[in-house]
Amino acid sequence: MSFWKETIRRLTYLPSRSRFDQELDAELQFHIETRAEELVQTGMLRPAAVAQARREFGSSARMREETRAAWQFRWLEDLAADLRYAARAFRRNPGFALTATACLALGIGANITIFSIADEVLFSQPSVRDPETLVRLEIGGGSNASLREYRFIRDAHIFAGLAGQNEEVEANWRYGDRTYRLYLVRVTDNFFTVTGIPVAMGRPIQPGDSGMVVVTHGFWQRRLGGDPNVVGRKLLLDGQIYTVSGVLPRDHRTVTGFGFSPDLYAPVAGENDEVAFCARLEPGMTRSVAYARLKATCQELDRIYPQGNRKTAGGLRISGIVGMDRINKDSGLNPIAAFFAMLMVVVGLVLLIACANVASLLLARASSREHELAVRLSIGAGRGRIIRQLLAESLLLALGGTGAGLVLNIGLTSSLSRLQFPLPLPIQFLIQPDWRLLAYASVVALGSSLASGLMPAIKGTRAGINAALKRSDHQVGRSAWTLRNGLVVGQLAVSIVLLSAGFLFMRNLVRASTMSPGFDIDHTIWANMRLVPESYTKPEKTSALIETAVERLRTLPGVDGVAIAHVVPLNGHLTNGTDLNTDLGSHPVHVNFNTNYVGPDYFRVMQIPVLEGRGFLATDRRGSPRVAILNENLSRRLFGTVNPVGHTIRFGKGAPILIAGLAKNSKYFTLGEENAFAYYEPYTQSDESTVSLHFLVRAAGRPEPLIPAINSVLGQLDGTAALEIKPMHSALVFAMLPSRVGAVLLGSMGLLGLVLASIGLYGVLLYSVSRRIREIGLRVALGATPGGILSLVLRQSAALAAVGIGIGMALAVFAVRPLAMFLAPEVRPTDLTNFVVVGAVLALVAAAATAAPALRALRVDPVVALRHE
């Protein structure tokens, strides 16, 4: 019989134990009756024949067990019996069961919650058909390419299908008398055909569609009221009318992933659009074959359409859209993956503390059951069988903890799914239980049961039968105390590591919140005005609008200055990496710097001091000599200690640019940056065209009262523009988000580890006192003072805490060093202050955990204690 047939045959008997027993009894009775008939035919009387037949067949119980072992999964039956026995035992001692389950629930719940978030962010599959054969292409060293390059590669027929998308797109939606900013994914008309993304209502965008959009489920519910007749509805986007062709499912995930949640999909708007490539591999095609064909095609593209230094055949890359392919050194996602890896280690340590806690409880339980276990061993039970039964108890606790942890996980992740993150792009996580989460939870449950139950099970069955039977309940083996104390020391040491990490991130948050960004955030208002592109095709019209807006905002009461900027610090960046020449040297200098195009009053409005030279003037316009301002870091990089004012720089073979001023360093992209290079040019000399205008308004007093007036002025200038106006200090939420997330997660894990470790210390000390009641009573009867009794408990507590803190400090010195990549430069992981504070906190918690056991020891009545057994 094959393995699978044998397995299926055995499984069919599992749910019908009583039917199997009835059939087996009938079979045995048939054989006995048959043998008895044979004996009767030889002349034996029937009663004697039946008795003889039964003797020949032997013990029916033994035969029943042997048959059951051959026809069923004996180990599974034994496990079920052990679990039922454990459940009955826990019903008699519910306090123990609830305490142990709660400890495991906290540790397991934290583990599966972080796992489910990491799985969603890093490994969730996009809502496409056959994601393993869909790949992402990069040509020319960049992720985006022109539509001409897209069509050339598409028409080469390298792949089964090639589509393009651009996810960083905004549009103005005019609805009634209001304008809303929407986030779009612009796609080629074959995008849904190539990717196979399904729709829940209507149909997707199809080849030939130009005025159709597909809305996401969230936008349909949030903005369109869940209109069941939404298909065919008209939307006015950037001045053009689009028709809703379909609605995506609730669980839709984009090709890019990472929680990006746009409002809708729309066709590419024009020839100037750029797209990222999604390609469908031909059946049987490997990536290496696709790479070779793509390289040959790009070389042909470069020959037909030369683009100077840019070569599309250079920097080619083909990567998958699922799994580890999205997490690679070139995608800039390593910090995200590293952060989640760190979190998984942290919650693993929390679970380790929880398991040590439960192991201490099981050790205490095993000590109180030594007599029972010895009796079972003495009457023939095998040690291995008893260990299996004790492990079943820990497995039942782990299953209970996993169930409670899953409930906790569902509550936390559902709250996270509804959370709106203050990020430049809309992010929403669709975290739902799936087979990966259940598989991980099962592995964690099994691992937790072994980690918490194996040592107590081995220890509980190690003592000899005679020793265990003779030992009194108040006698405690030295090895038991050594093991329990070792578990507590381990908990304290691990909690030191967790607390150190949490405290570092708390310090990092405090540092970030008190760190000066180098510009004024208390009296500055950020007003973003997104224009309809089709209404501002000529730069002159945009310039006229900017000048009018600046003049009108400047005349508002309470306004102390207004400036325009291409980029708002700490809320975006425009980075350039290039070679440039200075008039001091003949060799070009390669430098990566942050570029910003700003108005004449920018430095005064932002309160960024101009240390040398001047700021920009109204006369710095197109046609006038080009000027620029450097920050201190970039000046040192290009000119060393020489004052740059009056010197010139040149990009390639371009015209010289006069350095008009030297600005003080300020934060540009992150609060933690130290050596950022900043390069400023006049907004009116910029060739960068944009429909997203950033006005920075300096208020003479509090900025909030000025917001309605600013909104009114800009709305009157263009009613089709989407406005977003807020004080600059609230605009820094994005810059503060990494520090806050790190502080909340690491701080909460450190606190949870501390609570679990303190519970473990409290439990061991309380158990120690309860086992030494006779000894304490005898000491009191012989004249021991309260101070002497108190010192018994305090010595043990102090010894455990000192050893745990010492080992934890030594581990933490090495464990927290990798966290430096997530911290501000001023927050050093090995700072002595960190360890002193953490050690002091743990010492205080240990003292608090000692209070109740110490008081119990002081209240021991010697008369009662001497009778105690």
Image (cartoon, grey):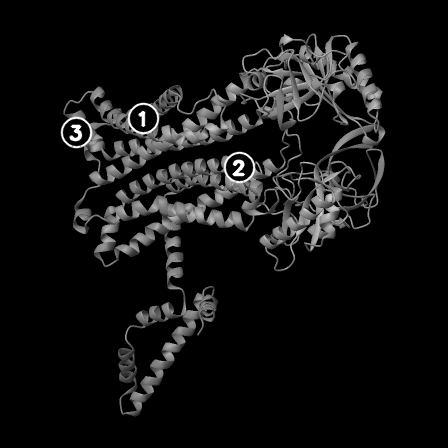
Cβ–Cβ under 8 Å for marks 1 and 3: no
Give the alpha-carbon distance from disc 1 to disc 2, as whole Å.
44 Å
Q: Earlier in the sequence, mark 1 or mark 2?
A: 2
Q: Along the horizontal axis of the image, is 573 left or right of 49?
A: right
Give the alpha-carbon distance from disc 3 to disc 2, as whole Å.
64 Å
How many numbered markers are drawn? Answer: 3
* Label 2: few (<14), some (14–19) or many (≥20) C-alpha neighbours in 10 Å: few
Give the image location of residue 801, x and y in percent.
Answer: 30, 27
Q: Amino acid at mark 2?
A: Asn
Q: Nearer the viewer, residue 47 or 652?
A: 652
Q: Which residue is mark 2?
A: 334
Q: Earlier in the sequence, mark 1 or mark 3?
A: 3
Q: Nearer the viewer, residue 863 or 686?
A: 686
Q: Which residue is mark 3?
A: 778
Helix, strand or loop at disc 1?
helix
Helix, strand or loop at disc 2?
helix
The answer to which quarter of the image holds residue 843 is top left
Give the image location of residue 340, x and y in percent.
Answer: 50, 37
Q: Along the horizontal axis of the image, is 820 left or right of 304?
A: left
